[in-house]
Image (spheres, rainbow, N blue to C red):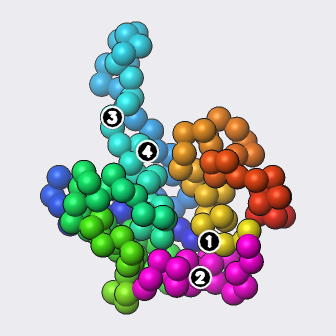
Amino acid sequence: MRLNKLSADKHTFHTVPFKPGLNLIVGKKNNPSDNNVKNTYNGVGKSLIIYLIHFCLGSNKIKVFEEKIPNWHFTLEFEIDDVVFTSSRNTSKQNEIYLNEKKYTITNFRRLMLKKVFNNETVTKNLTFNTLFPRFIRRDRECYAKYDTFIRKEQDYSKFTSVA
């Protein structure tokens, strides 16, 4: 799977393009010589981009999106085996998601993505799209700090079966 771009239907959101290979999402400090610890890279949207990627790939409902940015429509363009896909989801209608303009429930979308991305049609208790995908794009802050933490409060058994 390769991400191509993340976009929204509002002009205030700048489309995020992804290049082939490794993409790093980092903040840019306006004045690198400023040593004031309060002038950090916070607030530039790094975490939001990660959450939006997960959102467009069938994450659980994100209540704050519904409250803070109602009726925003986000689209993620990506490729699997050189086939281009677009997944779209509305912050006010989070129970549905569109893949190439076809409507899916979140559960059915996850099953389809498990099959397409991981070549796995069998859903088992601890092997789902939502348990495997975070191994590639870590969403939660505590998952950045430990090499073996991908999902908050994940049980050891689930960790081991997902990386086996």
What is the distance, in whole Å, between disc 2 and disc 4 at their CAs? 26 Å
What is the distance, in whole Å, between disc 4 and disc 3 at their CAs? 9 Å
If you read the primary sequence from the N terminus, does the residue marked by circle 1 or circle 3 appear first? 3
Of 82 and 63, which appears nearest the observer? Answer: 63
Q: Residues within 10 Å of mark 4 (few under 14, many from 20)?
A: some
What is the distance, in whole Å, between disc 3 and disc 2 at their CAs? 34 Å
Give residue 88's position: percent from left, percent from top. Answer: 35, 74
Give residue 103's position: percent from left, percent from top. Answer: 37, 87
Residue placed under numbered mark 3 in the picture: 43
Residue placed under numbered mark 2 in the picture: 111
What is the distance, in whole Å, between disc 1 and disc 3 at their CAs? 29 Å
Up-down: is 124 above or below 138?
Answer: below
Q: Residue at x 77, y 60 (%)?
A: 158
Residue placed under numbered mark 1 in the picture: 129
Was residue 106 drawn as part of the magenta stretch in this picture? yes
Q: Residue at x 65, y 64 (%)?
A: 131
What is the distance, in whole Å, between disc 1 and disc 2 at their CAs? 7 Å
Tell me the amino acid under the disc marked 3.
Gly
